[in-house]
Amino acid sequence: PSNKQHKYRIASIPADGIGPEVVSAAIEVVQKLSEVSKTFEIEFTHIPWGTAYYKEHGRYVDENVLDVLRSYDATLFGSVGAPDVPDHISLWGLLLAIRGPLQLYANVRPVRTFPGTQSPLRNAKAGDIDWILVRENSEGEYSGHGGRSHRGQVWEVATEVAIFTYVGVERIMRFAFAQAQARPRKLLTVVTKSNSLRNGMVLWDEVALKVSKDYPDVKWDKMLVDAMTVRMVNNPESLDTIVGTNLHMDILSDLAAALAGSIGVAPSSNLDPTRKNPSLFEPVHGSAFDITGKGVANPVATFWSAALMLEWLGEQDAKERLMEAVENVCQAGILTKDLGGTATTKDVTKAVCDEIARLG
Ligand code: ATP
Ligand code: MG
């Protein structure tokens, strides 16, 4: 029996591709943290949802998916998708079956260049890329509304309806302003495309203006998504917190991760800021079948995701210790191939565990 104050129960869903490799690495480092921690212990329960489960049961998740996840404090997720299942089936079958119903409407994606690694931007200096991307995660272009008629005919029509509700836009905008306010620079950029999309995107502009009145100390501006890609490349230091729609931030966060050095280091939180439902934490990258089973996947994105999970649970010290360990390991040049190194997933995991033990 332990006398630690806090005990957490986490659902782990490694799922497909490199998911199981990076999730088991992250569980190892979090267990190491809890060993040295005086305040918390943590128990992971493996949940076997994913493409293998789908092939056996005809569905990606258990029928009681929401009740199952609600019985845990949080979910640590790997990645979903397999070469022989269409991506829209696997994605909607697993991840989108969780995000929507649990109202994990805020997808937070911090991006930065780690010490000892390099941005592909020639002019970027250390610290230039240190951003928080906030992605609306519950509606917009990924609402699932739309349909197809006259299938297979040359006059076939397909619609994909982007849905923007005042409530949905207001809550993500408020969340983003609060995130920006909590950071030292208090800078927010609102990304839209209100020149050509004249309904939903204009609503975004209007809501941004309205919410900004409640955050007078936040400096904010608006960018069209196309111009934003240019600014991220040419003036990365001018950005701090960034908010945008489901589709726009999906794309910009892959760009951001690549600019920071590798998609292999990019983490994400899928939060229910009201805390009615448990939140989900996952690397931004997908199942990466080209490197699956080779032992070379970068586990840092999942380590950082686990750190965000610990922070969300209230273990700020553990989060900071984990991030310090990751930084020191990067600085020491223990890097996977995507970051220009030769270390394996296991090498990085062991180095981070050793560093956690050393930091104490
Ligand atoms: P999805 O369709 O789910 O986005 P994907 O396989 O199309 O998945 P990603 O997995 O996001 O795309 O990654 C694109 C490429 O980036 C991969 O093919 C892989 O080479 C590389 N990559 C992704 N994640 C990692 C990682 N953790 N470590 C090293 N390389 C990675
Ligand atoms: Mg992808």
Image: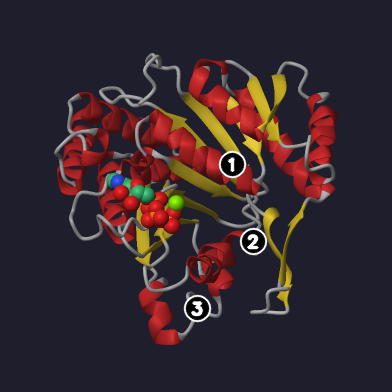
Q: State the separation of the CA atoms marked 1 and 3.
A: 29 Å
Q: Residue furthest front?
A: 154
User: Mark 1 is on which residue type?
Assistant: Met
Provide the residue designation for mark 1.
249
User: Does dot 3 land on a helix, a strand or a loop?
Assistant: loop
Image height check: is 64 above or below 226? below
- How crowded pointer 2 is (Cα within 10 Å; few <14, some 14-19, many 20+) is rated as some
Provide the residue designation for mark 2.
100
User: Mark 2 is on which residue type?
Assistant: Gly
Residue drawn at (78%, 43%), measured in percent from left and top?
197
Question: What is the x, y in percent for residue 354?
Answer: 16, 37
Image height check: is 161 above or below 165? below
First along the sequence among labels 2 and 3: 3
Q: Between residues 112 and 213, which one lies in front from this camera angle? A: 112
Residue drawn at (21%, 33%), measured in percent from left and top?
340
First along the sequence among labels 1 and 2: 2
Provide the residue designation for mark 3.
62
Q: Is residue 303 visible?
A: yes
Q: Between residues 84 and 165, which one lies in front from this camera angle? A: 84
Image height check: is 19 above or below 334? below
- How crowded pointer 3 is (Cα within 10 Å; few <14, some 14-19, many 20+) is rated as some
